[in-house]
């Protein structure tokens, strides 16, 4: 009589879903990636785990009762999630004392998102912290003009002493500018939209569990770094030369969604499509350079990383505004590195604008099209990925 024998590897299939999910929950991310390369049966492992290990709706239910409606609002209002929630999502962990941070441009869209939290999710708005008020503990330092205010929303849970906390962070510019250029360490630079999740420094953050400074040393940043040290991340200044012989995403010219970014497509069942296409965010370019800085009154100096970008490239033949890199001491190629938008795209869209103006009847041509631009222009956003050297990197 032939006996049907099975190996441990046979348990890593959907036929044994509970065992399969439990084993995968204990596998580090590096092991999951390696396992997908070992046999054909595991080639879809990461895809399968999106339904369980990286299930965004399941993670959001800790803060919102209707994740689908909330994500639809995010897509329509151009809001993104970052902060500790994004780290927990990628690392498949839960920090008991954490909250949900939503970043959105200041104005009517932020008002609508706040109304959704109050009317649909039954949160209560607390007294907002304005820019001239001191923040302690959790929150964000008021270093520059990228941030308007932080609104805190609280809701009672089933436990009498516990409340869930959601923060709406109102930004001056596109939220991605603040996340890239103003966050204090690489581990927290992650972005979740309504349909995708982006980890900008995944190798360092989720494989090596190291986080690198992107701001100078201060007491406020020290408190935040201490918090993540307790959660398992080692704080470092910069990547040492012997640690990584290749780029690893911590140098040079980059964009959101490039080869150094870990991108997880999210389940969009019953979710409204995003108002803004993915390529607008994935056109966001930034530079990562090394900056030397004093120790803030201490007798030491140290290197840290400087991430630079701006959100001010616009044209009447482009439907959307784009984020470009803003290098300071890094410019090996003045056409592509740091000036791609202005030196390469700029002259082209300027000529296309003139063509669109000529196509109009003379009596309807504006005297100054920058002030009184026609709304019938053709738009040329989609060909840009074919021109950018970072699009395929």
Image (cartoon, rainbow, N blue to C red):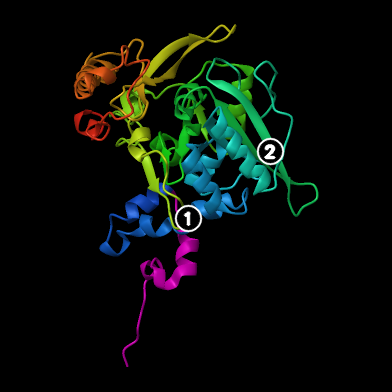
113 or 186: nearer the viewer: 113
Q: Quadrant of the C terminus?
A: top left
The image quadrant of residue 250 is: top left
Kindly report the distance in space between the C-alpha atoms of the residues bearing marks 2 and 1.
27 Å
Residue 344 rendering spot, x and y as whole percentages: 21, 19
The disc at residue 153 is 2
Residue 141, placed above or below residue 292:
below
The disc at residue 53 is 1
- Residue 8 in magenta stretch: yes
The image quadrant of residue 252 is: top left
Residue displayed at 45% across by 69% down: 17
Residue 152 rendering spot, x and y as whole percentages: 68, 34
Residue 100, placed above or below residue 3:
above
Residue 98 in view:
no
Query: On the rendered structure, is 281 left or right of 43?
Result: right
The disc at residue 392 is none
Residue displayed at 27% across by 32% down: 381
Q: Quadrant of the N terminus?
A: bottom left
Residue 197 rendering spot, x and y as whole percentages: 43, 43
Residue 313 rendering spot, x and y as whole percentages: 35, 20
- Residue 17 in magenta stretch: yes
Residue displayed at 23% across by 24% down: 360
Secondary structure found at label 2: strand
State which region is magenta. Answer: 1-28
């Amino acid at each position: 009589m032939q006996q049907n024998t099975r190996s441990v590897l046979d348990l890593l299939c959907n036929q044994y879903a509970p065992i399969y999910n439990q084993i995968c929950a204990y596998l580090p991310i590096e092991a999951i990636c390696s396992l997908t390369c070992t046999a054909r049966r595991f080639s879809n492992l990461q895809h399968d785990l999106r339904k369980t290990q990286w299930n965004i709706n399941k993670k959001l239910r800790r803060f919102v009762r209707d994740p689908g409606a909330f994500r639809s609002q995010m897509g329509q209002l151009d809001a993104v999630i970052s902060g500790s929630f994004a780290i927990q999502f990628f690392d498949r962990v839960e920090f008991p004392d954490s909250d949900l941070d939503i970043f959105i441009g200041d104005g009517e869209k932020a008002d609508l998102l706040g109304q959704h939290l109050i009317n649909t999710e039954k949160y209560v708005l607390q007294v907002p912290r304005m820019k001239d008020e001191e923040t302690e503990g959790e929150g964000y330092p008021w270093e520059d003009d990228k941030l308007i205010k932080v609104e805190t929303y609280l809701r009672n849970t089933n436990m009498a002493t516990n409340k869930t906390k959601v923060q709406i962070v109102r930004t001056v510019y596109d939220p991605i500018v603040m996340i890239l250029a103003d966050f204090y360490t690489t581990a927290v630079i992650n972005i979740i939209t309504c349909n995708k999740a982006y980890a900008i420094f995944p190798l360092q953050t989720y494989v090596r569990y190291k986080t690198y400074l992107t701001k100078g040393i201060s007491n406020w940043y020290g408190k935040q770094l201490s918090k993540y040290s307790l959660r398992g991340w080692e704080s470092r200044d910069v990547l040492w030369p012997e640690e990584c012989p290749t780029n690893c995403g911590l140098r040079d010219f980059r964009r959101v969604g490039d080869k150094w970014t870990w991108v997880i497509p999210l389940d969009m069942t019953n979710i409204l499509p995003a108002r803004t296409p993915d390529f607008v965010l994935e056109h966001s370019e930034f530079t990562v350079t090394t900056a030397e800085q004093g120790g803030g009154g201490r007798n030491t100096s140290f290197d840290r990383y400087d991430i630079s970008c701006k959100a001010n490239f616009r044209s009447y033949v482009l439907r959307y505004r784009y984020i470009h890199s803003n290098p300071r001491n890094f410019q090996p190629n003045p056409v592509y590195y740091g000036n791609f938008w202005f030196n390469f795209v700029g002259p082209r869209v300027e000529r296309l604008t003139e063509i669109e103006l000529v196509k109009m009847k003379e009596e309807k041509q504006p005297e100054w099209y920058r002030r009184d631009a026609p709304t019938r222009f053709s738009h040329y956003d989609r060909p840009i990925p074919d021109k950018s050297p970072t699009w395929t990197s």
